[in-house]
Image (tube, coloured by chain):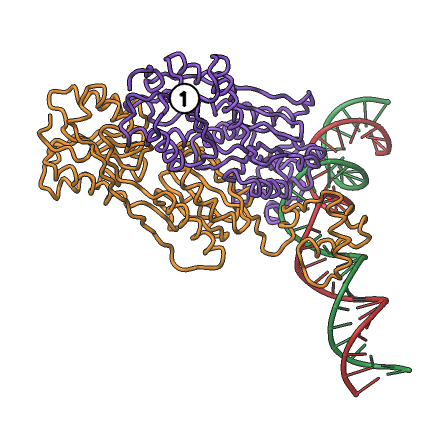
Chain colours: A purple, B orange, C red, D green
Amino acid sequence: MRQVAKLAGVGLKTVSRVINGEPGVTPATARRVTDAARALDYQPDVHAGNLRRSDRRTGTLGLLISSVDNPFAGAVHRAVEDAAAPRGVAVFASSFDDDPNREREAVIAFLRRRVDGLILTTSTASQAYLEPEVRRGTPIVFVDREPSGIDLDAVVSDNAEGAARATAHLLARGHRRLAYLGDRREIQTARERRRGFLEALGRAGIPTGEATVVEELHSERGARDALLRLLDSPDPPTAVFSAQNLITVGAIRALRERGRALDTALVGFDDVDLADLLEPGITVVAQHPEDIGRIAAERVFARLDGDDSPTRRIVVGTTLIERGSGEIPLGSQ
Amino acid sequence: MRQVAKLAGVGLKTVSRVINGEPGVTPATARRVTDAARALDYQPDVHAGNLRRSDRRTGTLGLLISSVDNPFAGAVHRAVEDAAAPRGVAVFASSFDDDPNREREAVIAFLRRRVDGLILTTSTASQAYLEPEVRRGTPIVFVDREPSGIDLDAVVSDNAEGAARATAHLLARGHRRLAYLGDRREIQTARERRRGFLEALGRAGIPTGEATVVEELHSERGARDALLRLLDSPDPPTAVFSAQNLITVGAIRALRERGRALDTALVGFDDVDLADLLEPGITVVAQHPEDIGRIAAERVFARLDGDDSPTRRIVVGTTLIERGSGEIPLGSQ
DNA sequence: CCTTGGCCTGACAACGATGTCACGATTTGA
DNA sequence: TCAAATCGTGACATCGTTGTCAGGCCAAGG
């Protein structure tokens, strides 16, 4: 900037004025400055500016998701980016693989970089550690999973309701021996989906004992192995509810391996790519990650713009997509 | 920081020393400082530090990919992140949907934030606009597509070779009437894949006229429509090479719709999720985005560490995965 | 012709940190 | 016991930018 000022033969402040489009500069002077800036390929340093500027905004957002390499998280990320880009806000995305320690490290890294706001998927038991940052005024919005130990905005899918709908869908086809394949219990959404499953059973008057609940699954492989064991048991399930993406894929593999894909009903939570091209098509409870990401970002920006209304828990509905696998009736075996 | 210094009853510099673990501070003093820092929930401002520090590193990387919501790009992103995280480097990812204007805007935004290095997928005709930044010493590595108009490091798949292999694979099953479904010609990889396809035909002594080349496809829908038209023509292809992810999926849909999935051979470029669970399984030339991302990030860090060897074009091989669709022989129709 | 009031412009301090250097206290060695 | 060396510490300038403010210039008005 000093070089630009010297080349244009003006003071530093005038360069600053021209760069930022502030009024009160003669067109001729402005012209000299822009020419000099172009000649030197000058790019202003936003960090130095932010340091001095009064609003102390860095124009960055921290986004914590399970992994950037994951369709659900990718869709959330894209939606956040699309909401942020028009405001000139850049997004730091961090994958933390649902590891509570990496969550805390990532959040600290975000804070040291003075992000203007945080959009977090959490896997810690309590997020009370964010308290000081909240007091400092940083907007924080949770996505996918609700916070605990602290009162903050959240944008989540209706997990229990979606799971209940999926379960009722299977029960309506006459199934009674259901299997629930779920993720690690420390994950809040996994607990919610399990609750929805059990409540649906309860409403149908089916004793919980008739259902098999397998939890702590977190890989395609693990899910496949778990379902293989169930299928090989003396009293295999006639319908399966797989409560997560990877688990659904693992379940499909297990059913295929035992040749049971056409006679065992399956509904998955969260949509899966190409699910409609499989035979049978996979019926799923689809979430709407684009909506979740967009709403979360809007919430952060609203808070930054001064919205200090009470924290809200925004629930995004799910959509049951019938593709065949979920409509297989009891008695096809 | 001033508050911490005051609370601990020490000078600013001593706080700085303790925070950065510099030697020469009495344990007792250090203790007072850390206590004060904890009591005030002090987090140092990395930007202010970087401003003064001699190496001028911000600990950030700019990553430009077609979209964060895209499996190939997501895998690259994850690999870059995994290479960057251990060094305390955070990644800005930008989606630009292959739009040259958004590419330039995103790069400028990265530069204003003083990223330490850039990893770019490009869709501009020439990247000469990066010249000034290169002179300034910022390491830039291209991924997926090679640069033109400027000499810089690049990490790419062996597009022509992979495409040729896929084509030869189809020819070996007796097919002669092949269709090539490709992306927009302004994309370098699309041109390379087309070249590989045509060269394989040439080597087999097949007149180019026998093949149908459809380009400028960039959506699943467009690919499907294009293949539907070919299938409905008087002389439909007996084998299809789809040169990109979405195009492959569109092609599968078209084949299904005309009931030709089991008698028309198909090989896709770039792997597709669940491809092995379809009937038939989809044979693909798989790329290795994790390797591409990792190598690109390592290259950037090597440059930052002072490696000034000549620029290199690193080619990551592809893998032909046979799953059924590509092994359908001529005469199944 | 001299004020007065706008309009441009630049000097200067400040943002939050770190590199440099000098100072006083302590330890070491003669 | 005293000089020299060592050690811990803080004052100060500085990084690149912007907010504040004062000053110079010119046109309008008395």
Query: Would residue A281 be found to the left or right of residue B81 on screen?
Result: left
Q: Position of residue B271 (x, y in %)?
A: 30, 36
> Is B157 in front, or is A98?
A98
Q: Quadrant of residue A173?
A: top left
Query: Would residue B329 be found to the left or right of residue B100 on screen?
Result: left
Mark 1, other Cα within 10 Å: few <14 / some 14–19 / many ≥20? many
Q: Position of residue A129 (x, y in %)?
A: 67, 37
Name the chain under label 1. Answer: A
> Is A126 in front, or is B43?
A126
- Amino acid type shown at disc 1: Leu
Q: Quadrant of residue B119?
A: top left
> Is A176 in front, or is A215?
A176
Check the picture and name the quadrant holding the C terminus of chain B: top left
Residue A119 makes an appearance in the image: yes
Residue located 58% across and 34% down the image:
A61
- Figure check: B274 above or below A328: below
Residue furthest front as drawn: A234
Q: Which residue is mark 1?
A: A178
Residue B98 makes an appearance in the image: no
Q: Position of residue B170 (x, y in %)?
A: 16, 37
Q: Position of residue D29 (x, y in %)?
A: 81, 22
